[in-house]
């Protein structure tokens, strides 16, 4: 999941269309989650380190942390490297566990895909599905961010067929299937990377738009209002999935890139994103820091919890 995902001007047309259509309409009951999932992502250098993960649980669980996204592979890895001990520990602690599988590092450039490459992907997905986790989360299931290469129709047809195949693999193990998409995908109907809310929803249970406000590089409004950005993108995605069983859970950023536009400290920046995500009927959120540095997240969660307690106390005095 690149920190340099480009939010080009193509998004603006989609934004205007969506706004005129009434983008913040209510979603149907089927999207309302019985449990809000509050998760963190852990890089492959951390995802098999049990003592380190025990520390994350001690720090995050008191503040509502209840989900971990663990890398299945090393960078460009051709096999799954998953610790069943880590998964068993997290399940014992009541955590929802998703295994992140990188399908095509940096995106596909050409078709057809080599058979050996697809066979490796199928094997990694199957190993991830049978390890005891709750979900397999597909990342980089896309083409490179370019109008070159295969046609749009070819891109969508290939990804649709691939998602169907991967769904059939995980279904044998009764685990959920998720997919990560660019943050602009809730806004766009046709995109050169071959991702679509509606097309993905045919095969997956949850879509994770990477709603990092810092990546909307051509859009001062969304750069400067992180809560609005996360809420809007999540709600747009839910609106587009209202006739499906699929839901939305955005990634939020816990890193400093481009946060100066918002003119708030990182802790407050994170708070605003959390509040935006949780002010929708989505499934929750996943925090992303490539280095696993989540001190600001813990503080943000503590601040939000304290404000809620204070508000409840004040309400009780009236």
Image (spheres, helix red, strand yellow):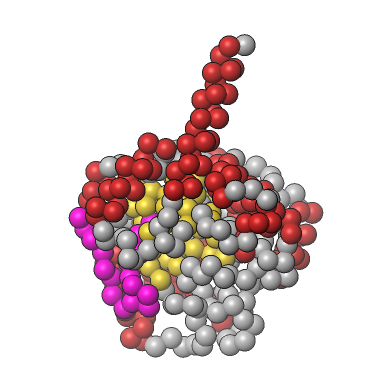
Q: Residue at x 78, y 59 (%)?
A: 16
How many dots with numbers?
Answer: 0
| Magenta stretch in the rendered image | 69-85
As displayed, is residue 79 above or below residue 249? below
Q: Residue at x 54, y 28 (%)?
A: 308
Left or right, 312 with respect to 261, comes to left
Q: Position of residue 53 (x, y in %)?
A: 30, 52
Left or right, 266 with respect to 63, comes to right
Observer able to see residue 295: yes
Observer able to see residue 90: no
Q: Position of residue 250 (x, y in %)?
A: 53, 54
* Residue furthest left as drawn: 85
Q: Position of residue 6 (x, y in %)?
A: 62, 71
Res. 278 image quadrant: top right
Left or right, 171 with respect to 287, comes to left
- Is residue 241 or residue 84 the one in the foreground? 84
Q: Residue at x 38, y 48 (%)?
A: 67
State which quarter of the image contains the C terminus: top right
* Residue furthest top as drawn: 318
Res. 240 image quadrant: bottom right
Is 80 colored magenta in this rendering? yes
| Secondary structure mainly formed by the magenta segment | loop
Q: Position of residue 294 (x, y in %)?
A: 43, 51
Is 71 colored magenta in this rendering? yes
As displayed, is residue 73 above or below residue 292? below
Q: Residue at x 37, y 75 (%)?
A: 75
């Amino acid at each position: 999941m690149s920190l340099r995902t480009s939010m080009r001007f193509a998004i603006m047309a989609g934004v205007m269309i969506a706004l005129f259509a009434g983008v913040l309409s209510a979603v149907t009951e089927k999207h309302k989650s019985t449990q809000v999932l509050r998760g963190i992502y852990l890089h492959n250098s951390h995802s098999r380190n049990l003592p380190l993960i025990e520390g994350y649980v001690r720090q995050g669980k008191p503040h509502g942390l209840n989900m971990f996204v663990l890398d299945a592979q090393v960078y460009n890895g051709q096999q799954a490297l998953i610790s069943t001990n880590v998964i068993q520990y997290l399940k014992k602690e009541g955590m929802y566990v998703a295994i992140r599988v990188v399908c095509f590092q940096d995106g596909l450039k050409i078709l057809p895909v080599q058979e050996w490459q697809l066979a490796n992907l199928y094997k990694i997905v199957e190993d991830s599905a049978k390890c005891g986790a709750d979900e397999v989360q597909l990342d980089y299931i896309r083409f490179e961010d370019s109008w070159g290469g295969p046609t749009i129709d070819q891109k969508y047809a290939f990804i649709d067929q691939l998602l169907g195949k991967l769904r059939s693999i995980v279904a044998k193990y009764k685990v959920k299937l998720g997919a990560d998409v660019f943050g602009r995908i809730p806004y766009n109907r046709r995109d050169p990377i071959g991702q679509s809310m509606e097309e993905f929803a045919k095969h997956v249970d949850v879509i994770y738009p990477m709603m990092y406000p810092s990546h909307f590089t051509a859009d001062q409004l969304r750069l400067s209002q992180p809560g609005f950005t996360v809420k809007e993108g999540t709600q747009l995605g839910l609106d587009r999935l209202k006739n499906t069983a699929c839901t939305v859970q955005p990634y939020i950023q816990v890193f400093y890139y481009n946060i100066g536009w918002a003119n708030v400290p990182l802790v407050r920046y994170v708070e605003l994103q959390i509040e935006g995500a949780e002010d929708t009927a989505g499934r929750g959120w996943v925090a992303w820091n490539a280095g696993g540095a989540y001190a600001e997240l813990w503080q943000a969660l503590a601040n939000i919890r304290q404000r809620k307690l204070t508000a409840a106390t004040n309400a009780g005095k009236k």
